[in-house]
Amino acid sequence: MTHKLLNFTLSLIMLCLACIPLGCSNFGGSDNDYSKSASLPPLEVPPDLTKPDWNTRMSIPDSGTISAVETSRHQAQDQDQDGQETTRPDAEKIKVLPKAEGIEVHREGNVRWLEVAASTDALWPRLRSFWKQTDIELEKNNPQIGIMETVWHEQPEALPKGTFGKILGGAYYALADTGIRDKYRIRVERVSADITNVYLTLRRAEQVGDIADDQAFVRWKAQPPSPELEAEMLARLMIHLGTDKNDARPQIATAPAPIPVEINLEMVDGEPILLVADELSRVWRRTGVALDRAGLFVEQQNQSEGIYYIIYTAAEGEKTKGFFSRIFSSDKGLEVNELYQVHLRAQDETVLITAHGNGEDDAPAKLDPEAAEILLNRLNKAYQIGKSSV
């Protein structure tokens, strides 16, 4: 059963329910016949997935293919810059925070970001209040490393807004499910004492399988990144930070795009290297967003050394090391939720990107060439996303 058919079925059910009072008065039906009904048995879900809650509009998918290492939720408290827990500001305090001024939209290839004339310390509460305003909870809120991530949430805009929805009213939207979940991630980067770059990426998962069939294999499948949807949320963030609503989207749409650069994955002395014909500063910005889009989530960064520290999550169909291979094999393959490094180094007019393991004291460790190629291939594909449409 497809999502469209499911929504149609729900609509039909609601229409029938609306007629029940009339039917009962005419035919003398019992008021408590519903007590004889029985619940369907629960869905069988693989152990690496969280069973979807079909009766909740904010159900959250979770799988190794679409989730990074998760941190505890900060629903009532946030962390300050020293790592101490502080009480979250109430709504009135959030409203009087000074709005960020001097917001500029920049673009490198398929990547857009905001350059905000504010320190990271001053900007962070405004970013936090943005998600509070949109009624999306934060799952990760770490100002020390400059990463903010939302919970998985349903995308209500995907529900039909036609005649059926108007007739059935709010009850329809309470029962209907789009089968789509989104998770946003913001990464901030300190440019100077009073300039901060803000990068925003989106992960989308779609329900696969028939929820009406108890024997069906129902799971959440990661969808390709969408620079267009990221740009829309970036425009909303601009408005929240103080940009006029009539100016935000035009600025996002008209951000100048540079000339496309040449990107090649090559083997040099038996080591895979991604070669990008561009300046290091530009490649650095694009690489950070591309890694997040590729499901290689940036956990830390050291721009002066040209290093991104990433968490590996397996893509669909990608081979990973199992439990026994980790114990008995000397294979240096990739391990899910383990930390790896991506290095950027300028050489003449080209940037060389290489992948490494993460050793003791965060020292780079040699990575098997096949494993390194997997990481760089995913990064390369993320570079190509949306070239013709952004």
Image: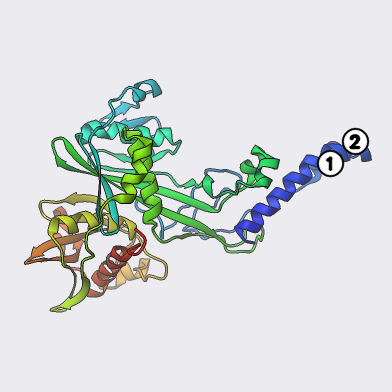
In front here: 380 or 45? 380
Is residue 71 at all visible to an observer of this figure? no
Where residue 364 sits: x, y (%)? 15, 61
Q: Name the quadrant containing residue 148.
A: top left
Task: Say what amino acid the circle numbered 1 marks.
Answer: Asp
Specify the amino acid type for callout 2.
Ser
Residue under pointer 2: 25
Quadrant in which the C terminus is drawn: bottom left
The span from disc 1 to disc 2 (Cα, nearest Å) is 14 Å
Q: Quadrant of residue 226?
A: bottom left
Label 2: how many Cα within 10 Å (few below 14, some 14–19, many 20+): few
Above or below for 206 versus 117: below
Which residue shows up at 68% across the image and 53% down it?
Answer: 8
**Mark 1 vs mark 2: in front:** 2
| First of labels 1, 2 by sequence position | 2
Seen as rendered, the residue at the extreme left is: 348
Q: Position of residue 318 (x, y in %)?
A: 37, 70
Is 167 drawn above or below residue 121 in the view shown? below
Q: Quadrant of the N terminus?
A: bottom right
Which residue does the image show at 20% across and 40% down from the upper left? 196
Determine the secondary structure under disc 1. helix
Q: Quadrant of residue 111?
A: bottom left
Indicate left or right for 154 with 296 as reference.
right
